[in-house]
Image (spheres, helix red, strand yellow):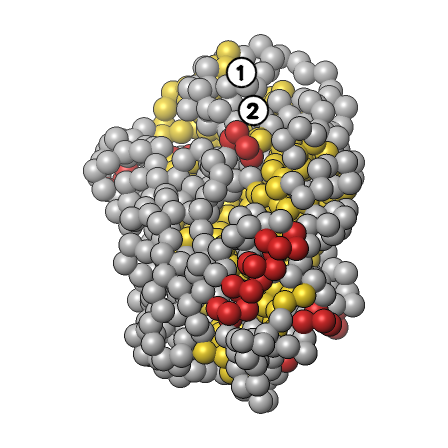
């Protein structure tokens, strides 16, 4: 029988400010060596102790809110003696002990030999800006969402330094305070770092490189330009930004009226008022005229970039314009002439396929994109790489009650959707997987729109699934994925809602602030993360502030014959059931690579409502794991405002705000990873519960939330931008 001898957590933290003054560290008595795996230590006297040994004080590399090096003192508990592998799993080791958190090669433990070979975990991040934005003034807002295993003080990292460079000069801004933004399509919030970057010192008209340096509380600085993907990429990389701070770049406007316009008399002008009275009949003609205008007026030959094509209210059949709309620095834009008439300003496929028909850079905003044909190709740039860019913003995607066809949006390269939703005719699933096409989705603040080939998603509602896809054709490997503050809900799938089975390397995976709701006839795991026969290694997985309701999470199994290393930082989550299978289940003595998960190394303050699928308690044979982590609660009473998962009404679209009847843990002072949750509730460490709401609360204070799953129609009008509210997304 295994005996737990102590549970610990990070100490030496306060609710406000940055690093506290480092206390004097005395040599630790008992532990002599930190083993190479970083989660175990040698304690020669452990078998003789009747009480839990003292924690280990560890000095770590890190940074403060100004981005300056600032060592952090963390207290790491010795949690238990480790056991022998199967078939001797009921026998404890003589000297080996498990730690509450990892110790890294760069850490110092006074008086203890540190042989850990672990590198510090890297920050994981995603931009909320799309690539090749047009900065039409001297100030441009940059936004970066970040996750890290050593989050604290309501911030995932200590600071972010934003950098904008024209190749000769650079401007920087270091930000330590977090902000949040809400999107109308999803109603959800995204906490992130933001800055209003002053572009005045940089060259007018230059295509800037946007970079960032992320300074974690613990670990090494992470510079996007050198530590992330080379540009361009659907994974984290640098951005390009057109610096039009004076407005001298020049914007050409053209209008299109499918009914009353004329391609022979349409006019382009440098201001919208002048162009409006003379609309074109087709997008292709308007785009060609913009190219000519840009060459004659602004000296930009063969470049429609920066041009704005405005569609008059009505139905417009799409006409190919790849060559006419080609651009150099920024996309050509197609938008509604009146954004308030987005619902009735419609661009359709025209009922026939349009192959290789859109420019390699295109942005569409404030339009309804409606399917009219069956198996037709609508938007296709013939992309063979991530160099192609397609952006939709504040659009309605409407299947028009037609059958699904995965190539409706076909080879578009990087596909960035922001504040988009679906129409009354259903979801066309424009972000779904199709063959070997080069489509790589990022979704921000959308409703339904992410799809099955999503690389990154933040602040999205009604997502039906996520699958970590293997690289195929022109689509590169997913790396450093970020999924934050989304609502995943599915009532029909026979597969896991979140299905990840792939090597997760140093760039990691961030799954933070999400709700995953299983209901209806769904019976598989809500989340399968490198489990169920998966033999892929996994490191730097950050799993924080999530609510998994209605079904189980199968986490980092080693249930086959292959042993690999698997680990994660797991904090402030609510699980329905938690399963972790290893050597005893597989009858494989070598399957110890996921023991950091079973021993809850890097875990703190999670709640598991119903234990595991084979046991409510902890043991070598329990799928719940060997021991509880600090603050871990199991067989936890949960009560929500409106439970519509399998355990409630089973209808889907529930409100998972915990009520006072919930016994979920409270987040300790200093340990919250973020300052708000996905519905905008402030997370107050020491008062807020895990999951999605402040706690304790009076019943009347509950912030009700239900993911959008409404039928779109006259009774359910589409949401609009809240342009008067600076905290809502504005283009």
Q: Position of residue 425 (x, y in %)?
A: 45, 82
In this figure, which residue is indicated by the disc labeled 1? 30
Query: What residue lies at 51% left-to-right and 31% top-to-bottom?
Result: 227
Q: Position of residue 366 (x, y in %)?
A: 60, 71
Query: What residue lies at 28% left-to-right and 40% top-to-bottom?
Result: 535
Residue 716 in sight:
yes
Q: Position of residue 638 (x, y in %)?
A: 55, 64
Badge number at residue 354: none
Residue 112, compared with residue 236, is above or below; it is above
Tag 1's secondary structure?
loop
Residue 574 in sight:
no
**Whole-number angstrom distance, CA of label 1 to CA of label 2:** 8 Å
In this figure, which residue is indicated by the disc labeled 2? 53
Please report whichever mark, 1 or 2, sits nearer to the chain's N-terminal start: 1
Tag 2's secondary structure?
loop
Query: The N terminus lies in which quarter of the figure?
Result: top left
Query: The C terminus lies in which quarter of the figure?
Result: bottom right
Check if mark 1's residue and mark 2's residue have beta carbons within 8 Å: yes
Query: What residue lies at 59% left-to-right and 89% top-to-bottom?
Result: 715
Residue count near mark 1 (Cα–Cα under 10 Å), binned few <14, some 14–19, many ≥20: some
């Amino acid at each position: 029988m295994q005996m737990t001898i102590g549970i610990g957590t990070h100490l030496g933290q306060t609710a406000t400010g940055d690093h506290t003054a480092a206390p004097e560290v005395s040599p630790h008595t008992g532990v002599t060596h930190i083993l190479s795996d970083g989660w175990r230590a040698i304690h020669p006297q452990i078998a003789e102790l009747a009480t839990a040994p003292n924690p280990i004080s560890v000095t770590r590399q890190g940074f403060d809110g100004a981005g300056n090096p600032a060592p952090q003192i963390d207290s790491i508990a010795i949690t238990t003696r480790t056991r022998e592998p199967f078939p001797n799993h009921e026998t404890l080791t003589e000297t080996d002990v498990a730690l509450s958190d990892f110790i890294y090669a760069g850490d110092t433990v006074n008086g203890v030999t540190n042989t850990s070979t672990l590198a510090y975990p890297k920050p994981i991040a995603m931009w909320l800006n799309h690539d090749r934005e047009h900065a039409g003034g001297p100030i441009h807002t940059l936004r970066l969402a970040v996750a890290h295993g050593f989050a604290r003080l309501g911030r995932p990292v200590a600071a972010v330094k934003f950098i904008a460079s024209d190749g000769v000069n650079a401007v920087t801004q270091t930000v330590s305070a977090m902000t949040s933004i809400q999107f109308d399509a999803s109603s959800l919030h995204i906490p992130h770092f933001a800055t209003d970057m002053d572009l005045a010192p940089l060259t007018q008209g230059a295509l800037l490189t946007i970079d960032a340096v992320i300074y974690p509380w613990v670990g090494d600085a992470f510079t996007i330009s050198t530590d992330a993907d080379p540009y361009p990429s659907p994974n984290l990389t640098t951005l390009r930004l057109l610096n039009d701070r004076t407005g001298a770049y020049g914007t050409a406007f053209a209008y299109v009226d499918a009914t009353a316009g004329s391609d022979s008399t349409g006019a382009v002008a440098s201001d919208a008022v002048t162009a409006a009275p003379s609309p074109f009949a087709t997008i292709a003609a308007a785009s060609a005229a913009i190219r000519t205008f840009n060459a004659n007026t602004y000296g930009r030959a063969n470049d429609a970039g920066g041009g704005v094509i405005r569609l008059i209210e009505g139905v417009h059949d799409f006409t190919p314009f790849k060559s006419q709309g080609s651009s150099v620095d920024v996309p050509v834009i197609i938008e509604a002439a009146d954004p308030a008439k987005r619902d009735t300003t419609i661009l359709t496929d025209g009922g026939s396929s349009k192959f290789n028909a859109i420019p390699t850079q295109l942005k569409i905003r404030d339009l309804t994109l409606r399917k009219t044909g069956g198996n037709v190709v609508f938007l296709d740039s013939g992309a063979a790489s991530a160099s192609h860019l397609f952006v939709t913003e504040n659009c309605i995607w409407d299947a028009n009650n037609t059958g699904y066809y995965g190539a409706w949006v076909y080879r578009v390269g990087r596909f960035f959707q922001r504040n988009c939703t679906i129409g009354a005719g259903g979801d066309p699933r424009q972000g779904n997987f199709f063959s070997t096409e080069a489509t790589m989705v990022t979704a921000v603040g959308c409703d339904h729109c992410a799809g099955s080939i999503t690389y990154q998603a933040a602040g999205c509602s009604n997502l039906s699934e996520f699958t970590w896809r293997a690289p195929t054709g022109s689509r590169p490997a997913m790396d450093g994925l970020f999924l934050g503050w989304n609502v995943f809900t599915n009532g029909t799938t026979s597969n896991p809602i979140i299905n990840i089975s792939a090597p997760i390397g140093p760039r990691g995976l961030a799954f933070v602030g999400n709700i995953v709701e299983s209901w209806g006839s769904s019976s598989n795991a809500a989340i399968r993360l490198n489990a169920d026969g998966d033999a892929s290694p996994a490191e730097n997985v950050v799993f924080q502030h999530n609510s998994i309701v209605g079904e189980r999470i199968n986490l980092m199994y080693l249930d086959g014959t292959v042993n690999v290393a698997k680990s994660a930082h797991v904090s402030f989550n609510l699980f329905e059931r938690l399963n972790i299978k290893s050597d005893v289940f597989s009858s494989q003595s070598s399957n110890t690579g996921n023991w950091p998960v079973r021993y809850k190394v890097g875990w703190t303050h999670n709640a598991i409502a119903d234990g595991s699928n084979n046991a409510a308690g902890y043991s070598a044979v329990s799928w719940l794991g060997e021991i509880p982590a600090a603050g871990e609660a199991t067989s936890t009473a949960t009560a929500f405002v409106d439970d519509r998962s399998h355990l409630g009404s089973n209808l889907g679209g529930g409100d998972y705000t915990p009520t006072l009847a919930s016994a979920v843990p409270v987040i300790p002072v200093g340990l919250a990873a973020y300052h708000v949750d996905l519905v905008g509730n402030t997370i107050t460490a020491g008062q807020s519960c895990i999951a999605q709401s402040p706690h304790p609360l009076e019943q009347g204070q509950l912030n009700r939330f239900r993911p959008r799953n409404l039928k779109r129609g006259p009774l359910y009008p589409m949401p609009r931008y809240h342009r008067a509210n600076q905290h809502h997304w504005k283009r």
